[in-house]
Image: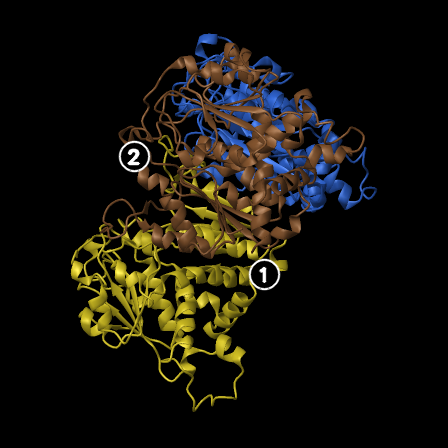
Chain colours: A yellow, B brown, C blue
Amino acid sequence: MKSFINVQDIGPLEKAMAEAFEIKNDRFKYQHLGKNKTLMMIFFNNSLRTRLSTQKAAMNLGMNVIVLDVNAGAWKLETERGVIMDGDKSEHLLEAIPVMGCYCDLIGVRSFAGLTDREYDYAETVLQQFIKYSGRPVFAMETATVHPLQAFADLITIHESWMESEKGKVNSEKFPTGQRSAEANSSLLPIHSYLKRPKVVLTWAPHCRALPQAVPNSFAQWMNAAEDVDLVITHPKGYELDPKFVGNARVEYDQKKAFEGADFIYAKNWSNPGVTNPADYGKITCEDRSWTVDTEHMSWTNNGKFMHCLPVRRNLIVTDDVIESPNSLVIPEAANREISCSVVIKRMLEAL
Amino acid sequence: MKSFINVQDIGPLEKAMAEAFEIKNDRFKYQHLGKNKTLMMIFFNNSLRTRLSTQKAAMNLGMNVIVLDVNAGAWKLETERGVIMDGDKSEHLLEAIPVMGCYCDLIGVRSFAGLTDREYDYAETVLQQFIKYSGRPVFAMETATVHPLQAFADLITIHESWMESEKGKVNSEKFPTGQRSAEANSSLLPIHSYLKRPKVVLTWAPHCRALPQAVPNSFAQWMNAAEDVDLVITHPKGYELDPKFVGNARVEYDQKKAFEGADFIYAKNWSNPGVTNPADYGKITCEDRSWTVDTEHMSWTNNGKFMHCLPVRRNLIVTDDVIESPNSLVIPEAANREISCSVVIKRMLEAL
Amino acid sequence: MKSFINVQDIGPLEKAMAEAFEIKNDRFKYQHLGKNKTLMMIFFNNSLRTRLSTQKAAMNLGMNVIVLDVNAGAWKLETERGVIMDGDKSEHLLEAIPVMGCYCDLIGVRSFAGLTDREYDYAETVLQQFIKYSGRPVFAMETATVHPLQAFADLITIHESWMESEKGKVNSEKFPTGQRSAEANSSLLPIHSYLKRPKVVLTWAPHCRALPQAVPNSFAQWMNAAEDVDLVITHPKGYELDPKFVGNARVEYDQKKAFEGADFIYAKNWSNPGVTNPADYGKITCEDRSWTVDTEHMSWTNNGKFMHCLPVRRNLIVTDDVIESPNSLVIPEAANREISCSVVIKRMLEAL
């Protein structure tokens, strides 16, 4: 695997999921792979979960890790070519990227959308420069438009939760009880082997700051790829995600209708993607707090689980009651970030 | 050991001290304990000694270490429940803590007193949330009211110094010369086996900023627990430490009387603890620079050693002459931070 | 090796170069040397290459690494003795240095020139305090007046490039073809065994901020020591480097004349060294942009290679065209930082 950006990069999802559960059972199994290998984690933006879970995953795999906060302790970077660099930026990305590549074997990059120039963001300009100039395999630790480590962890979390629930009981016709080992039940079974495909609802929720679309984009992309979930996306008019991420998902503008019968509610704010009106790109065009997920919203679901990638603004995205309820999966989701990242790094180490 | 906050958490001090000297003789002896274990160090405040010595101790024990500066590179954290989070704080501690716990085996937390709300500080609100929600053993790297790694290192330093000095010679009746091996003399002997208990004086000293009471609190607590030292506390009226930390120590408001015959002077500033007047909590109610420890002060002692936890404001807490004199123990104290921390982490690893 | 500051500290250059090429062939060969040893990297200033390459080198050698950004997460440090520390500085370097030394085996220090007090800077006041008070071997990660890890990497880069080029072909009289193994050709051959000594030109270039002289100082020092290069230094009048660094190099004020026939152009800005006029120390006394290295400049050379230590201000020091041309060695130079640092750390570990 030369880079990890989109769901296609991980190959067949069933295999990737099997590896995820294998690693979750024994996190240090592939520790030999990382000996004398160095991961460089490059942050242009803040991070908690990604920073910690990626470090942990790399150390589980026996790697050395170097963390670089570009905006703290390094030099401010110029990104445009042709500029006379007599301002506050001491170094050009065109030098910095190959230099960083010199001192490591793998690179993880976090670089958020600027939210002012849709074309620049959706071209993944910074990420593509890393891929082009670093000379190393690169994986996205949330870039301008995608956050695949999160979406992969979300998929793992949905499978785990579904397998444990009554609703997700194995389809007894396809897999009569007694014919499958416990291990098979717990690790390798794709959701589409179950009696019922879970209904997964990605819902927009209000926020006080303009946020990127990376998380909903990747979530939609991965749920589409999983094939074994029934994805519905709900948001105010004008917040349509890019069609290449929406794929075959059903879009429902009525949040209540969308929630009806849902097994999983995945809440997230995003700023206007500028799909229906390019001038709105990156703006907050709806502040309707009736979209905040509260207990009434959850009562519309089929005893649905609540998910969010975190960090979450309480009582804006979701109420205290919902996020603290037994149906909240936000912590297991975060915990699975270590697992999704371990699979990705393992694959990259194997391909070196 | 599930948490390390107070002296009681370490169990019998004699055993803890013996382990400290054992580890000082061979810092890598317990390296196997930390294999594939991760320490997460979480800093809400600045640190030099604690940051470096804790990392060193954990690496000595074979651990992986992740350092997180909450205020640099992560998200600002909300600590109140029920708030509509539409301000500058992107994440709630109630999510952040269990998430951090996901990616590690042990947690060290530094979170200073805010010095505005005595009840909040003395309830150790932040630390207790880590203990309650992280799912991991937690140790204090200086919290609102305690700094036990420092006090433990101070106790090690006092023992070492006392054992080496003429004054601390072994009580020949209890331990006739020739009957004890050098090893016993250097490692396992409690101070109360000596001819004379050292007189240890904790003295307030002036400072230009309001500082927490964590260091004097823990120092008093540990000296009380050690039983084999004679503790006197001296400070201006109104600076009384919390009685639960003062314990059986003698309080002497006349600094000169307190210093007379002292074997160890432990200087430290603290802001008003609000014990006698709650409205004074966290304030500077005395700026009297006659309390600065200078050579005249030290001349009142019995050739006393000078101690301070560092960082120290020279010529405010202590003069250049005193801190640079052969009787200054400030560097050995700092060096013993690696040792005290090694014992604590070793215990926590054994209990996993 | 107790400290690494000047070229003399590394001993015979031929041996150091041989070790560099040996390590470049097998970066993990000396990994046993660093077991249970800790490097502390102390940054008073920003860093990209030095931060990353030094960490990488130390990890290659099996060391534990602690990185300390003094201005982020630690305490502001007082450097003057005798000050009443009631300002914004919480700790004195006289305590901080021996404390840092407590927790490690080797120390790397980055501390730039202040550029206001020539005597203070050229006395290497901060570095010398680390050497005097830390109790550990210390190496310079760019100090007030030198950057030896860079100069060593530059020398490696020049040798590599020269050996690969037609111009640098082995002197057939001294080393008739067929009598030398490929390994000998690629690793151990000093430049003075070649047909022609390369002409190396250190050229000043304009900049918008006042920069230290550390890089040109060390570059001149190392090129002088190498003996097998022909060093010319060119800069506007008044920018004369300190004679102790210029050594036997030829100074040529006419940039075009200097460039004629050059095999290597090493561009760098530096502020006025205050040699001819002490009052000018650390100032920008020339802003002449005709010194910017562009394709016309390079056309004066003998198909010369372009070098710069990075970070570089594009279109101020050098144009996009030149730095992106096949003759640009800036990335191989940066890559060799890992190698030069590995040799230095290896030597220090061997001498512990």
**What residue did someone put label 1 on?**
A28
Residue at 41% across, 86% down = A171
Q: Chain letter for mark 1, please.
A: A
Q: Which mark is residue B116?
A: 2
Q: Chain letter for mark 2, please.
A: B
Location of the C terminus of chain A (image quadrant): bottom right
In the image, taking residue B178 as reference, residue B294 lies left or right, namely left
Residue extending furthest right? C179
Q: Quadrant of residue A102?
A: top right
Closest to the observer, C114 or C106: C106
Q: CA distance from mark 1 to mark 2?
A: 46 Å
Q: Quadrant of residue C258?
A: top right
Closest to the observer, B131 or A267: B131
Q: Amino acid at mark 2?
A: Thr
Q: How many labels were placed on the picture?
A: 2
Q: Residue B153's x, y, as percent? A: 56, 34
Q: Residue B207's x, y, as percent? A: 39, 21
Q: Quadrant of residue C11?
A: top right
